[in-house]
Amino acid sequence: MSDKVAVLVAGSWGTALASVLVSKKLNVMIWSRNAEQVQEINEQHSNHRYLKGITLSPQLKATTDMEEAVRGAAAVLIAAPSSAMRSVCSQLKSCVKDNALIIHATKGFEIESLKRMSTVISEELGRSEGDIVVLSGPSHAEEVIRQCPTTVVVASASSEAAAAAQDLFMNHDFRVYTNRDMIGVELAGAFKNIIALGAGMSDGLGFGDNAKAALLTRGLAEITRIGIEMGSNPLTFAGLAGIGDLVVTATSRHSRNWRAGYLLGEGKALEEVLSSMGMVVEGVRTTQAAFALSEKHGVQMPIADQLYHVLFKQRDPRTAVMNLMGRDPKTEMEMMPLQTWEQWHS
């Protein structure tokens, strides 16, 4: 089998994961549309815009030619922004091998259709969604690239595909678990960005640790509610893709979503915040998707609802907090199905 792996695209996360693969002595080629970025990776061994101060391995090669990147690759890792996933996969279809392992590491939805990334990939490549693998979990690119100990999860309905992805990535710095609940892992990875935005906003407002702890806890509850409704294993949200990724994204200054929320809490307008970030903030688009999905499935997501109105309806953040605090009394232990996911899917 070929030891070549193609990585699409050369953002911070794609570059960090490509570096993990290079550490496994694999033949890795990363694709980008940006010719200057490709030249920088190949000649200066850096990707300064996304990973400042980091020296990349000379073994990592880059190209603007997707066919060159994918030619002969046994596996293709897609780390494109959710907004670009369909166009990237449309271009990929003509050059990827039929038996290549397809892995994606994108945390978001296609806003127009409310589809998960694996569904978009399946439609564009003409592959079974069950054979696609999603990689997720608590993993800042800035720490992965520095080889800090990191643990993630790869999920697929195909145990063989998940095991192949696990073997591809796992090394002494990057521990990989498998999970059969691809839907839950995708949903957890996407929805937690909303709560991270809220956590940053809470910090920007100066509300302290009590407020953030409540936000994370109640945020996880509403993520789990919508996840169960959409076919996820509830236990997935207590794992790496759920609590793990939620904690790291909602508490770290590496997090784009936390930083964007913090600036919003300080009173800056959304357009100003996004312009200053210089990189995609997936939580903004995901908040749009969550608002629509909660209505579609009839599931209450009060935190996502308030954030939606802050982001897109000019609601004052302090008013949003007052609305959350002033909701009707509830019981903490909400009614959720007691049957296990294994029983539902047997």
Image (cartoon, rainbow, N blue to C red):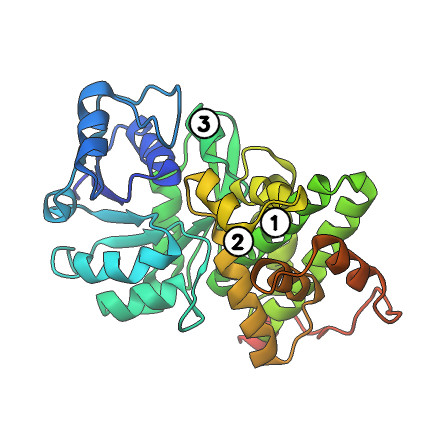
Residue at 24% from the left image edge and 56% from the top image edge: 88
Can see residue 185?
no
Give the quadrant of the N terminus.
Answer: top left
Q: Which residue is mark 2?
A: 283
Q: Give the label on residue 172, or none.
A: 3
- Would residue 132 appear left or right of 300 to someone viewing this image? left
3 vs 1, front mark: 1
Residue at 76% from the left image edge and 53% from the top image edge: 318
In the image, is residue 133 above or below residue 166?
below
Disc on the earlier residue, 1 or 2: 1
Marks 2 and 3 in Cβ contact (< 8 Å): no
Q: Give the label on residue 197, or none.
A: 1
Spatial separation of the CA atoms under disc 3 and disc 1: 32 Å
Spatial separation of the CA atoms under disc 1 and disc 2: 7 Å
Residue neighbourhood size for the residue with mark 3, other residues' Cα within 10 Å, grouped as few (<14), some (14–19), many (≥20): few
Marks 1 and 2 in Cβ contact (< 8 Å): yes
Marks 3 and 1 in Cβ contact (< 8 Å): no
2 vs 3, front mark: 2
Q: Amino acid at mark 3?
A: His
